[in-house]
Amino acid sequence: MSDTLPAPADVLPHRPPFLFLDRILRCDAQRAVAERTFPADEPFFAGHFPGNPVVPGVILVEAMAQTLAYLALRARGGGTVLLTGIDGCKVRRPVRPGETVTFSVEVTRAKMGLVVARAEAAVGDEPCASAELRGYLAPQA
């Protein structure tokens, strides 16, 4: 991790228990890479699923969206990014307690406050989720 990159909580408006990024590994104008290790005491594991805990797919999508928001907010210098669309989402493998997921997003289009990015999540070399994300960079207040 680069010492020059701010922590996710220093850039994103999200806070626990709804902040799903532990650290940022890379962030430039077009691409960001982040990580999250899902601890066994995450509250959602108690009900998803008892005896066979799995990170919900929507949490993986949210973490990918937070990675996109981090990239967009770093480029802009602040504000709010709203998720406006999720296309072609696939969840390919379960994520278990204690596993570290790497989230990668790459901007494919950006115009007039709208941004489209290809997002992927992986545990090691194994893909676990992917989607095309669409977001809107709301005007700064």
Image: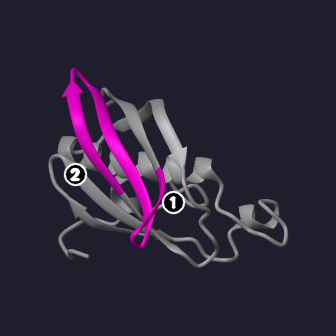
Tell me which amino acid carries mark 2. Arg
Q: Which residues are magenta?
A: 104-129
Element type at marker 2? strand
* Frontmost residue, 88 versus 133: 88
Give whichever of discs 2 and 1 has the lower sequence position.
1
Q: Position of residue 72 (x, y in %)?
A: 27, 43
| Circle nearer the viewer, 2 or 1 | 2
Q: Quadrant of residue 122?
A: bottom left
Residue 89 located within the stretch drawn in magenta: no
Give neighbour class at mark 1: few <14, some 14-19, many 20+ (Cα, 10 Å): many
At x 64%, y 74%, the residue is 97
Count of marks placed on residues: 2
Is 44 left, or right, of 32 in this rendering?
Answer: right
Q: Position of residue 15 (x, y in %)?
A: 52, 57
Element type at marker 1? loop
Position of the C terminus by quadrant: top left
Residue 9 visible here: yes
Residue 137 position (above or below residue 24): above
Residue 13 visible here: no
* Frontmost residue, 93 versus 9: 93
Is 129 left, or right, of 133 in this rendering?
Answer: right
At x 37%, y 37%, the residue is 80
Residue 127 located within the stretch drawn in magenta: yes
* Numbered label attached to residue 31: 2
Residue designated by label 1 = 20
Tell me which amino acid carries mark 1. Phe
